Image (spheres, helix red, strand yellow):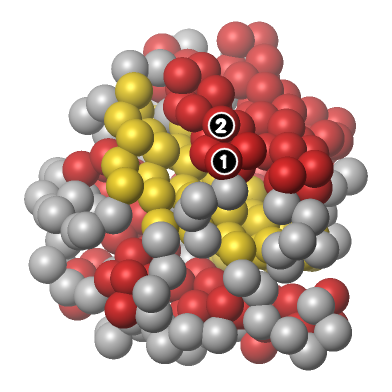
Amino acid sequence: MALGYNSLSIAQVAGSVAAILGIEPPTLAAGASPLLVRAAREAFHGLNADRAFLYNPDAIALWLFQKYTALFEEALLRSRLQLPLRSVMPSVTPVCFASMYTGAQPAVHGIQAYEKPVLKIDTLFDALLRAGKKPAIVSTTGDSVSMIFLEREMDYFIFDTPEECNEKALTLIERDEHDAIILYNADFDATMHRYSPESPEALQKLRLNSEVFAAMHERIGRCWQKHRTFIGYCPDHGCHAIDGGLGSHGLEVDTDMDIIHLYDFIG
């Protein structure tokens, strides 16, 4: 039996990013989060952001944030707003990221199981392209973010390891050629499946994800000084331990559905 869910939805992310950048949202996107948009407006003194950087660590549950808050220290110190959000069902990676970046529920965007077809409906990336923006995705080979948003006239940087992805994202920030960068890391998800969500190995990756966000934040602060940047630490779903201690997700329970996003406004 599920407990009380967070009231905000990850389906509001696409519309919120669009509103903060001052562009039209994806055509089927849910409404933006008024709180998030207001925070951005106040931070940027009523102006739109002209850059967005969204870091997508996989499977970071709200309960992990609550129980192991110290492991989020570096990310927390670099975020002005923390929003508890609700994922979608089934709470698996391609379904959740499809909702995050289309703004639509699974029954609308069409991915309703652990499968990775290219999305045919309008996405945030399509909205960015229509607005004359230059987006990029940095992700690992075979993962959902590398596959379901293909076939757009945008840049894709696909590598075998999260470390390569992180280095590439830092390089892209330095080059300052993209208006929106999405960076995906699956290392916590892979580790908690192999061991357990609270194993030493998984908790080390949890801390590392926070440090990666901090590294991106620092590089943006140094290299994008002429821009107003909206930056987010934005996981897709949570996780839970199953018999034998291994990690899993996909259920309609609070451990899998409740997540937290961290946001900041630079410039």
Which residue corresponds to the image point at 67% horizontal and 23% vertical from the top-left? 208
Counting other residues with Cα less than 10 Å from the Cα at mark 1, is it few (<14), some (14-19), or many (20 or more)? few
Compared to 179, does 43 lie above or below?
Answer: below
Q: In x, y percent, where is residue 32? A: 54, 84
Residue 253 visible in this rendered orientation of the protein: no
In the rendering, at what x and y percent does residue 250 appear? 34, 45
Q: Position of residue 37 (x, y in %)?
A: 67, 82
The circle drawn on residue 190 is none
Front residue of 132 and 118: 132
- The nearer-to-camera label among 1 and 2 is 1
Figure quadrant of the C terminus? bottom right
Q: Residue at x 55, y 23 (%)?
A: 167
The three-letter amino acid code for the residue at tag 1 is Arg
Amino acid bearing label 2: Thr
Q: Quadrant of residue 127?
A: bottom left
Hey, which quadrant is residue 28 in on the image?
bottom left
Q: Tag 2's secondary structure? A: helix
Q: Which residue is mark 2?
A: 171
Q: Which mark is residue 175?
A: 1
Q: Residues within 10 Å of mark 2 (few under 14, many from 20)?
A: few
Whether tag 1 and tag 2 are in contact, CB under 8 A, the answer is yes
Looking at the image, which is closer to me, 230 or 224? 224
Q: Is residue 144 left or right of residue 244?
A: left
Secondary structure of the residue carrying numbered label 1: helix
Above or below: residue 160 compared with residue 125: above
